[in-house]
Amino acid sequence: MPLHKAKTIGLLCEITDEDSYKDIFYIFTKLQERGHQVRLVGYINDKEVPFYCLPQLTADYFCQKHLNWYGIPNMEQIQDFLKEDYDMIIDFNYRLHPAVQSILALSHAKFIVGRLGECQNAYDLFLNDTTSSNLKYLEAVNKYTQKLTGDER
């Protein structure tokens, strides 16, 4: 399914600083404005979720203190994310995180897109793109999902 036809989209990312938060939140907002039902899950590789990561009804953030002994997120919001049958999950991560890897493995999404070489077995579409911005990566996701389905506009 091409990105523009996906009704439900899950976004996975790592929040490293306030700029990365603003960057992914911009994409999250734009997809919502285009009529997609979007759910965002952001991982913070630290002991606490920073003050600028404001949880919302469809945007949640977790950190190291939310991981169980096996490194799997242990939050009700993450369990809710995993119960959804998304048309597409887009993994924006640049680095390997076992917590995010476990979400990908447990997901019921119909189609998973990612750019992390270490996780390419978890993806239905792997785009080797770790150098461009998240927005350019999203454009590539749109382009290649259209090409795969023959639905180029």
Image (cartoon, helix red, strand yellow):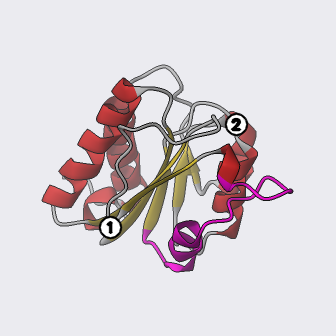
Q: Residue at x 34, y 49 (%)?
A: 54
Q: Which residue is mark 1?
A: 57
Q: Secondary structure at mark 2?
A: loop
Q: Residue at x 39, y 38 (%)?
A: 51
Q: Which amino acid does the dot numbered 2 rest on?
A: Leu
On whether residue 77 falls in the magenta region, the answer is yes
Q: Secondary structure at mark 1?
A: loop
Q: Nearer the viewer, residue 149 or 117?
A: 117
Residue 149 percent across, percent down from the top left: 39, 62
Q: Which residue range is magenta in the image?
A: 66-87
Residue 118 percent across, percent down from the top left: 74, 38
Residue 55 percent across, percent down from the top left: 37, 55
Q: Which residue is mark 2?
A: 96
On whether residue 28 falls in the magenta region, the answer is no
**Mark 2 vs mark 1, CA separation in Å:** 27 Å
Disc number placed over residue 14 in the picture, else none: none
Q: Residue at x 85, y 56 (%)?
A: 69
Q: Which amino acid does the dot numbered 1 rest on?
A: Leu
